[in-house]
Image: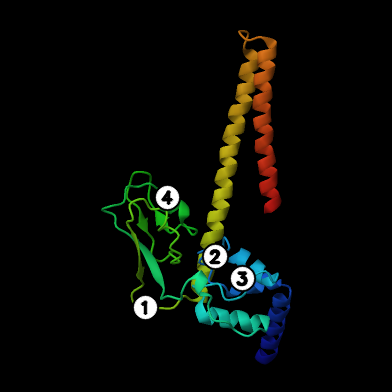
Amino acid sequence: MPIERTRKEGTAACRAMSTLSLADRIDALLPQTQCTKCGYPGCRPYAEAIAGGQAPLNQCPPGGAAGIARLAELLRRPPLPLNPANGVEQPLRVAVIDERLCIGCTLCIQACPVDAIVGAAKMMHTVLAAACTGCDLCLPPCPMDCIAMVPVAPPRAWSSADAEAARGRFEARQARLVREQRQREDRLAARALAKLDELDARDDLAPQDIARKKAVVQAAIERARARRRQAAARQ
């Protein structure tokens, strides 16, 4: 009986895998650091480019030789050496902020793809080492050059569990950014509608001036609505 159950579970797993697109299966093998070293804005766009034949499989430094080998096996292609134009394979590293020099500009927080940096404007920031993917995207925007990438101690490899956790943090951050953008747009729309009501109540302006101002406000509202429709279509 246990053997039969195992066979059924294996068959179900195979069926589930068969429903995944090639891009899904490639993405599942990528490290989810979202470092952009592959030349794409994240792991998923790179996976889609590989699946579409628009990118080779050797552009991911965090995945390194082992990652390239897994992709080659999936795609039934010969493995390639990592393209040096995309960087070099390195031990797992995390960002560390010198809090004595940090001025609280928040630029590193905005750059982190997995919300691994916490802090507030004009206050010291710190890195949540357990959440850091080592992408080093926080280094370029720092005006104080107070962030360093240091090897994790004790040394260890980036695991599939790390990748899944990083994917979850990245997706949560993307959802938060979309939510915050909508909230900002809602506030602006409310102000714009209030402005229209204010114009209707004014008696110190000529009708043509009121009509012109209302047209400007209405155009701004329509642009905001169009941006929201475009954002919804991309999701």
First-in-chain label (3 vs 2): 3
Which element carries disc 3, helix, strand or loop? helix
Q: Residue at x 61, y 18 (%)?
A: 198
Query: On the image, numbered disc 2 is attached to which residue?
Result: 167
Q: Amino acid at mark 2?
A: Arg
Which element carries disc 1, helix, strand or loop? loop
Query: Which sits in the foreground, 218 or 58?
Result: 58
Q: Label 2 to label 4, Cα distance in Å?
A: 22 Å
State which quarter of the image contains the C terminus: bottom right
Query: Which sits in the foreground, 121 or 87?
Result: 87
First-in-chain label (1 vs 4): 4
Q: Label 2 to label 1, Cα distance in Å?
A: 22 Å
Q: Amino acid at mark 3?
A: Asp
Instruction: Name the disc covering residue 83, or none.
Output: none
Which element carries disc 4, helix, strand or loop? helix
First-in-chain label (3 vs 1): 3
Query: On the image, numbered disc 1 is attached to which residue?
Result: 155
First-in-chain label (2 vs 4): 4
Q: Measured from the top left, where is residue 124 in percent x and y?
A: 32, 50
Q: Label 3 to label 1, Cα distance in Å?
A: 25 Å
For disc 4, the neighbor class at 10 Å (few under 14, some 14 to 19, many from 20) is some
Query: On the image, numbered disc 4 is attached to which residue?
Result: 107
State which quarter of the image contains the N terminus: bottom right
Q: Measured from the top left, where is residue 147 in percent x and y?
A: 34, 59
| Residue at the far front in the pictured view | 85
